[in-house]
Amino acid sequence: MLDKTATLFAPGNFGGAEKMVLEAFLNFKSNLWLIRETRCPQHCNYFIERCNQLGLNFRVFDSNARLDFGLIKVLEKTIKEDRIDLIQAHGLKANILNAFLPVKRIATQHGRTSHSFKMRLMEFLENMAIKRANALICVSRELYITETYKNRFFIENFVLPPNKSPMDTNKHHKRLSVAFFGRLSPEKNVISLIRAIKKSPDLDLHIYGDGPLKETVLSHCKHTQNVYYHGFAKDPMLEMQKYNGIVLPSHREGNPLVIIEASLLGIPVIASRVGGLPEMVKDNGVLFDPQKEGDLEYALKQFQLRLNELTASAQENSSITRQRYSFKQWEKSTLTVYKKLLQKS
């Protein structure tokens, strides 16, 4: 069955969605089709590099425009030649293009950023495209509840367990330390996190990631003694084991892998009360309201005061996380959706 299906994906800065798609194809024998933006090919080229390292099979389709109708014709020809019956799209551009293809169509909603007028416009077009899909997969319960599309399914992301066992954080940092992993863009709210950390001089913040706010982050690091920037992390799970906690202060989220990864490792978290995060963060961390002034600072103080309690709870819950966010669970749920749609052909 999977040889007649394909995943259509336009990689961006390597993050949660990119990692999940990449790791899915280690054992998911569908066809992997990548869209490479010719105006900024570096993101897809990095993804291609990772695919080659893992020995994955894939096809690359170059795109020369935001709304690339020429690429739609190329995809239609490939669908006919390869006898593809179903395509699952991940990401904004893939969801838009997929709406015009002559197959069973699945859109995947990882969450919306809406951090600029241009992005809000593109997300409006994506929403129109999703209405043409045969099914919508939502990666968080919050997305599943708020979406109005009738034929929608709730399938959480998965995380593969780390190859190496957790390390003792005390061997790496004498001071209490937390880390941020993610795209350095407005919706991730990392600048507010830096400002809050400045008011907690006994707590260090280590930042991993890349994006449009990189230079602003670097400027803050130069003028702040307890904030450190480490660039992009190829293996976030290996790096996060060095720290006492993980912070995700986003304004918007779906089902972020970084929180699943931290939970899998038994590391407590401080996270904003948005998207799917309240369902993911219980007694293993502290939640706060990103719109409420001073709430992040209060959450950081609570984290420090309750560190032993939170760490113990996070470690106790790691086995539950392993089962809930397993690849087998994700694969079973995804194949169920595929079979339902193909049976209607």
Image: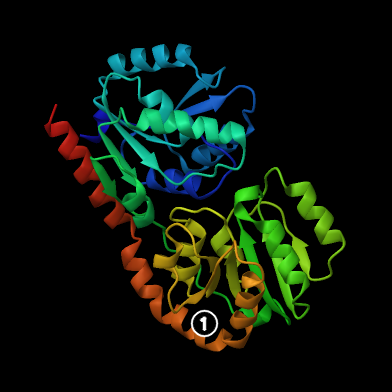
Please state the total of marks drawn on the protein image: 1
Q: Is residue 8 visible?
A: no
- Three-letter amino acid code at disc 1? Thr
Q: Nearer the viewer, residue 324 or 136?
A: 136
Say which residue appears at 49% left-offset and 17% top-offset.
68
| Quadrant position of residue 160 | bottom left
In this rendering, position of residue 197 left or right of residue 5: right
Outermost residue toward the front in this view: 292
**Residue 61 at what x, y percent from top left?**
48, 21
Q: Quadrant of the N terminus?
A: top left
Vertical placement of residue 128 versus 250, above or below: above
Q: Is residue 88 left or right of residue 271?
A: left
Q: Is residue 82 left or right of residue 110?
A: left
Residue 8: image location, x then y, percent: 40, 31
Residue density around tag 1, few if under 14, some if 14–19, many if 20 or more, within 10 Å: many
- The answer to whether any part of residue 61 appears in the image is yes
The extreme right residue here reads 223
Q: Which residue is found at the position 46% from the left and 37% from the top?
A: 91
Q: Position of residue 108 (x, y in %)?
A: 37, 40
Is 167 on the left or on the right of 61, as rendered?
A: right
Q: Quadrant of the C terminus?
A: top left
Q: Position of residue 134 (x, y in %)?
A: 25, 32
Relative to 249, say whether 12 is above or below: above
**Which residue does the image show at 57% across and 59% down from the upper left?**
236
Q: Which residue is mark 1?
A: 311
SS class, disc 1: helix
